[in-house]
Amino acid sequence: MLWVAALVVAAALVLKVPSPDRVEVAGFPGIPVPGLCLSKSVFGVDCPGCGLTRSLVCFFHGRFAASWRAHRVGWIMAIAVLLQFPYRIAALVRREDDPLGKWTPSAFGYALILLLIGNWLVGFFL
């Protein structure tokens, strides 16, 4: 998971969001990254994660208002990714799988899922 978090941060720093509906690799202007959402491409319906990539890219570039506009839960997900670094390093140093116990990481994960679904449902009414 430490490598996944590092990959997410590195990818977010390599990508850029030139407009609210596009993500590009820095240095390759005008060539958008293909959409990743199967729900949106097949059914035309946003999923709970639609906009997270743009939100994370904006967050890691310090564009916090744009991050919020792309996905209201994106900043929380970005912080969750950043928290993986001290958590996973502590697990490696202590040589234990769950430095905070089993309940805390599970509760945090379920809270993130509920926030994503809640945000998605709110999006239907706004």
Image (cartoon, rainbow, N blue to C red):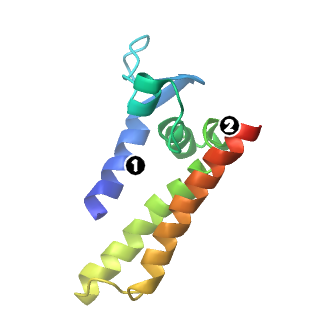
Q: Which mark sits nearer the N-terminus, 1 or 2?
A: 1
Residue 106 lies in what quarter of the image?
bottom left
**Residue found 65% across the figure and 44% down from its top:** 64
Residue at disc 1, secondary structure: helix
* Residue 38, percent from left and from top: 38, 31
**Quarter of the image that includes the N terminus:** bottom left
**Residue found 51% across the figure and 60% down from its top:** 113
Mark 1 residue crowding within 10 angstroms, few (<14) / some (14–19) / many (20+): some
Residue at disc 2, secondary structure: helix
* Residue 95, percent from left and from top: 22, 87
Say if 44 sits above or below 104 in the image.
above
Amino acid type, residue under disc 1 in the picture: Val
**Quarter of the image that includes the C terminus:** top right
Say if 119 sits above or below 95 in the image.
above
Viewer-closest of 65 and 72: 72
Say if 32 sits above or below 8 in the image.
above
Observer-side mark, 1 or 2, equals 2
Cα distance between the residues tagged 1 and 2: 19 Å
Query: Which residue is label 2 attached to?
Result: 69
Viewer-closest of 30 and 47: 47
The label number, if any, that marks residue 9 in the structure image: 1
Amino acid type, residue under disc 2 in the picture: Arg
Taking the view exactly as shown, the residue that stands out farthest to the right is 126
**Residue found 42% across the figure and 23% down from its top:** 41
Q: Contact (CB < 8 A) between labels 1 and 2?
A: no
* Residue 30, percent from left and from top: 43, 10
